């Protein structure tokens, strides 16, 4: 009886002694700094690549910014310090969200010409364009189909894509304009790309972290696009890009580059090859960061963007004449 | 000495022999929930949670073994310490157990020891996260378990003090790998150690309930008590715990042994 009672009380004690817990940082300037640095240190996925590209050293950054995140800093000063620290990652997927501001690194598109004007675009779309599956589309004067897809957050439906492709069925070629498309849902990008291939195509690789170390990664898993069982486009296609093409839109360009009838025209894309996760700090600020890297079909990084097949920029002359240089180039390319 | 004191306590109280019987209990509870899941967030979340618990105990007078089935449904709404970020938790647990029982102290103390099979299905949802905001919880466990029930009269009424304890042994659970997204698992079908064997070391889940029943009639009892369900796991370099503390109240229906509830 005595032994039974002893075991009865011992087992819960042993179980309690094996509590699964996590270190908590205090809600102070230093505590929030330490928490943020640790989240990025353990979860961010491009340390190795960026060390090779421009010498990113996250441990050195700790020493620099620890001094700046002093205890007497107010919340605005602390926010500035932490945002500056995150900007060292040069990643558009890295943000710090507070109730008063969104910390961001937008140099990937702000430092470059937009090569896109909605004023010019209106001259092509006019006002009687159609809208379906998040796309605005119409047939241009030279029988070229034009579809503008501004965000992959807009859902794509099979029936919508069927209608769009049926509408363009007698066109000589198709322009898919994704300039300023900052991304959204990857499945929308896959669903759209599946309308432009006729066989299962290797379009890239995915990977994820398996531990806290900077180089703890899983094996590369191949990423395929399988042809849609619905209507598929069989003629030439041009995809228009600029530096505002980011994240899921960057992935869409990565997919389309693998298909034989597709040409990419415009500027290099903005990049954003890491799937973003979120986490939060002791003071409630939320941090977003790249967690799962993706690569192109040659296992190369696309984090800093994808080069087009034809570099084309908007010219001042064309602008004055009300012409979109990229659309005009695409029309000529499709007419060849 | 302690043993003698215990013996004295059990024998001094007035005699109230209660035959073992089949029961079903419907109990609801409210209390605090504390959540950690480093897959979603490094911060701990705490808040209020609600539980519905159904317990069906089947016993036969002439048998040494009896069975227990429990359905436990939990839902919690929690916030981090800043109160800016919210996490929702939902969980269903099915427990099926077989117990060997012993009657002591002239049948007033009923000890039951055995094991439970536990199936757990649940989710966590971080309301502020944009990508990958949820975590699925799915596990199967074998748990050694014990129940002690002591029947005693007080102020002319019959009472039963009941304590139930479930401790971990082995199991298997679903978990994404450390940084693996649900998009990879479910959209791409990429498997990476997502079905993980667990032991009482890697998943020290522990559950206990202390309750007191007041027999208000031959068929019915009122039950109040405490339920603590402490689910924990550390797999794939991820840590998670959901601690639920509940004050419970409910009714227990008693069935004669010839009747199967």
Image (cartoon, grey):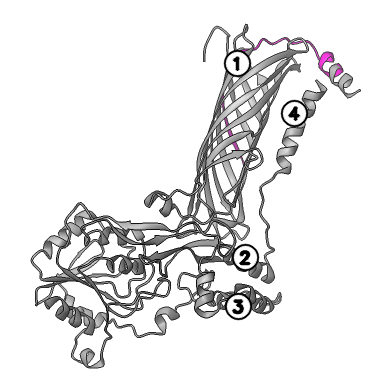
Q: CA distance from mark 2 to mark 4?
A: 40 Å
Query: How many other residues sit within 10 Å of disc 1, few (<14), some (14-19) or many (≥20)?
Result: some
Secondary structure beneath disc 1? strand
Q: Which mark is residue B167?
A: none
| Quadrant of image for the C terminus of chain A | bottom left
Q: Chain of mark 4?
A: A
Query: Residue A279's x, y, as percent?
Result: 55, 61
Name the residue beneath numbered marker 2.
A38
For the residue pair B256 and A142, the one nearer the viewer reads as A142
Name the residue beneath numbered marker 1.
B66
Circles 1 and 4 on the same subunit:
no
Circles 1 and 3 on the same subunit:
no
Q: Chain of mark 3?
A: A
- Which residues make up the magenta segment? B8-31
Q: Chain of mark 1?
A: B
Q: Does B69 sit above or below residue A115?
A: above
Is residue A235 a member of the stretch shown in magenta?
Answer: no
Q: CA distance from mark 1 to mark 4?
A: 20 Å
- In the visual, does A196 lie left or right of A277? left
Q: Earlier in the sequence, mark 3 or mark 2?
A: 2
Is residue B29 a member of the stretch shown in magenta?
Answer: yes
Nearer the observer: mark 3 or 2; the answer is: 2
| Quadrant of image for the N terminus of chain A | top right
Dots 2, 1 in contact, CB < 8 A: no
**Residue at left 62%, top 9%?**
B63
Name the residue beneath numbered marker 4.
A8
Circles 3 and 2 on the same subunit:
yes
Circles 2 and 1 on the same subunit:
no
């Amino acid at each position: 009886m005595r032994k039974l009672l002893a075991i009865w009380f011992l087992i819960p004690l042993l179980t309690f002694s094996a509590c699964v817990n996590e270190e908590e940082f205090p809600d102070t300037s230093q505590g929030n700094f330490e928490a943020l640095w640790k989240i990025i240190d353990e979860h961010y996925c491009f340390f190795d690549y960026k060390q090779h590209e421009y010498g990113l050293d996250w441990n050195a950054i700790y020493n620099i910014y620890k001094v700046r995140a002093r205890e007497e800093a107010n919340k605005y000063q602390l926010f500035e310090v932490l945002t500056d620290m995150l900007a060292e990652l040069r990643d558009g997927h890295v943000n710090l969200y507070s109730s008063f501001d969104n910390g961001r690194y937008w140099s990937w598109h702000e430092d470059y010409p937009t090569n896109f004007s909605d004023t010019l675009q209106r001259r092509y779309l006019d006002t009687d364009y159609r809208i379906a599956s998040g796309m605005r589309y119409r047939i241009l004067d030279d029988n070229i189909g034009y579809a503008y897809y501004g965000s992959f957050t807009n859902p794509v439906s099979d029936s919508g894509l069927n209608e769009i492709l049926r509408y363009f069925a007698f066109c000589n070629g198709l322009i898919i304009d994704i300039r300023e498309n900052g991304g959204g849902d990857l499945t929308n990008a896959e669903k759209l790309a599946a309308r432009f291939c006729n066989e299962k195509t290797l379009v890239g690789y995915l990977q994820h972290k398996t531990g806290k170390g900077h180089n703890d990664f899983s094996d590369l898993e191949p990423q395929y696009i399988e042809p849609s069982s619905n209507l598929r486009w069989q003629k030439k296609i041009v995809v228009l890009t600029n530096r505002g093409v980011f994240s899921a839109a960057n992935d869409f360009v990565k997919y389309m580059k693998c298909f034989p009838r597709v040409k990419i025209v415009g500027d290099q894309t903005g990049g954003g090859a890491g799937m973003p996760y979120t986490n939060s700090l002791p003071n409630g600020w939320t941090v977003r960061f790249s967690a799962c890297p993706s690569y192109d079909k040659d296992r190369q990084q696309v984090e800093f963007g994808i080069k087009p097949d034809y570099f084309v920029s908007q010219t001042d002359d064309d602008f004055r004449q009300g012409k979109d240089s990229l659309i005009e180039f695409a029309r000529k390319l499709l007419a060849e | 000495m302690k043993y003698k004191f215990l013996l004295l306590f059990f024998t001094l109280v007035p005699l109230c022999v209660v035959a073992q019987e089949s029961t079903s209990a419907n109990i609801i509870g409210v209390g605090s929930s504390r959540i950690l899941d480093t897959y979603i967030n490094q911060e701990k979340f705490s808040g209020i949670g609600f539980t519905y618990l159904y317990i069906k105990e089947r016993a036969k007078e002439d048998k040494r073994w009896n069975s227990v089935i429990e359905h436990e449904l939990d839902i919690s709404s929690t916030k981090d310490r800043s109160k800016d970020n919210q996490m929702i938790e939902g969980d269903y647990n099915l427990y099926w157990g077989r117990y060997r029982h012993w009657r002591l102290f002239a049948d007033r103390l009923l000890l039951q020891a055995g094991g439970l099979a536990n199936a757990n299905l649940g989710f966590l949802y971080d309301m502020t996260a944009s990508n990958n905001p949820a975590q699925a919880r799915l596990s199967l466990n074998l748990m050694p378990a014990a129940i002690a029930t002591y029947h005693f009269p007080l102020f002319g009424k019959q009472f039963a003090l009941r304590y139930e304890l479930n401790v971990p042994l082995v199991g298997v659970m679903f978990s994404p790998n450390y940084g693996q997204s649900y998009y990879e698992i479910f959209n791409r079908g990429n498997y990476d150690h997502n079905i993980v064997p667990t032991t009482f070391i890697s998943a020290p889940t522990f559950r206990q309930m202390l309750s007191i029943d007041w027999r208000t009639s031959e068929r019915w009892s009122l039950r109040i008590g405490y339920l603590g369900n402490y689910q924990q796991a550390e797999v794939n370099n991820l840590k998670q715990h959901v601690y639920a503390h509940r004050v419970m109240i409910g009714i227990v229906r008693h069935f004669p042994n010839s009747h199967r509830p």
